[in-house]
Amino acid sequence: MSHPSTGRLKTLLLAIAAIAVALVGLGAAASAASPSLPDPTQTGSILIHKFKTPDTPTGLPANGTVQSTTGLTPVDGVTFSIQQVNGINLTTNQGWLNANALSLVFNPSNAAASITGAAGSYTLGTATSQTTAGGGNASFLGLPLGLYLVSETAWPAGTTPSAPFLVSVPLTDPTTKSGWLYNVNVYPKNSVDTVSKTVDDASAVKLGDPVVWTIKGDIPNVSTLDGYKITDQLAPQLTYVGTTVSLSDNSATLTAGTDYNLTTAGNLVSIVFTGPGLIKLAAHNTAQVVVSLNTTVNAVGEISNTAQLYPNANSITTGTPTTSPPVVTKWGSITFQKTDPGTKALTGAVFSVYPTLADAKAGTNAIALGTPAQTTFPVDSSGLVTISGLRYSDWDNGAALTPLRDYYLGEVTAPTGYELLAEPIKFDITQATSAAGVDLTIKDVPSNGGFQLPFTGGHGLRNYYIAGAVLIGLALVLSVRRRQGS
């Protein structure tokens, strides 16, 4: 049997427990309902992570939090400037409403931006700059709470900068939705575009033969293009013939005068895209612009050329293109000297040059060189002849060539009193042969190998003729005397 006081104690304890639970619940409810306000004593940061625009969208949220950047290419060397927008107080509701009503206007041709709102233009605070490094990172720390304009002020050549943007410090935490994010991560993208150049001279043998230069320029991975230009300052040893412009995947036709304007002045070839052409490029930005320049070579030498790509209006305005690696075509000469088996120089020899051994043996397809073009080359009074205007034997399509491309020298006229060469002479054109001096001595042997042939009028036969004449004379005298004595 329980004691009455024990029952009253249990009832009191249960009541106390219920009150405690209720108080805890009320405390929790009060805590959950308590608003989280921006702390004006806090400072924040804008953490920039700069990457090359990927071929396909990442799908990652742009909410100020740290994101995975696996597979993205960081871009160092981009300078960012931040400026606080004066008059925007993000610790008040009206400040956020004012921020929402702002209009950001960007002029890509000079990378300038202006901010306007219901009250007119807003002034900006002092600019602070950082340049991305260590994997595309730039950090702006210790920032007072407010709204900031972030602009790119410098970037590597060939880069299309991202437009200026506004960043609020702080942001509502997208994870909890009940707090503030004071350290804001942003991931602006740049289209980084390159240009390449190749040369096709494989079928060219002599000066005047066609040499084709091909330029391939990336198209910025952006939805709207504000400018695009490709130029090529051809070397003076090149004579310009013509240009074709196309897309690498042939997904659209590019028409001169409609999609782009082509100009040539002082051997500078310039292709500048017009409004309709820029729309086509933006719609096919996974392709490349292909420019084929047709030229001929008019002088010997190692001829190097580059191309320049201006992928946006700012690069055109500021004159800051990206330049292709140089590509080279090489043309030279060789000097021969004609001598006897010793060192005596011989005159009167005439040579021709042939592209193959078979041609040299048959005397066909002799290479015409010089101005005016000629296929025969006589030696001078010192027995010298220089064959100039042939492509290097060890260089082809902008790269070293193995095996070598050989040429053949055939003698078509021999010096007086000397034999022709019995077979063609193989030779190569290189940097060494194109330098000053005699590269090859060609010796001709005297007629009949230097041995004298017998001939009418020689001393031995003359004596026989004289003796015969004397005998005939004596016979005639004896014959006359006999007739007189009879």
Image: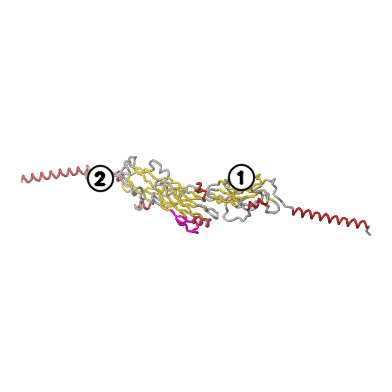
Return the x and y of residue 240 as percentages of the image width and height: 41, 50
Q: Which mark is residue 164?
A: none
Looking at the rendering, the stretch of residues picked out in magenta corresponds to 243-259
Which of labels 1 and 2 is toward the front? 1
Q: In the drawing, does residue 43 fall left or right of residue 211?
A: right
Q: Position of residue 163 (x, y in %)?
A: 57, 51
What residue is disc 2 on?
454
Circle 1 sits in a helix, a strand or a loop, which is it? Answer: loop
Quarter of the picture holding the N terminus: bottom right
Disc 1 designates what residue?
125
Q: Nearer the viewer, residue 461 or 92?
A: 92
Quote the CA–CA distance across marks 1 and 2.
Answer: 110 Å
Q: Earlier in the sequence, mark 1 or mark 2?
A: 1
Colouring rule applied to residues: secondary structure
**Residue 484 falls within the magenta-colored stretch:** no
* Badge 2 amino acid: Pro
Residue 252 falls inside the magenta stretch: yes
Q: Main secondary structure of the magenta part?
A: loop
Residue 73 or residue 477, whichever sits in front: 73
Question: Left or right: 466 with respect to 166?
Answer: left
Residue type marked 1: Gly
- Residue 360: % across, % down: 36, 51
Query: From where the camera sits, is residue 128 visible?
Result: no
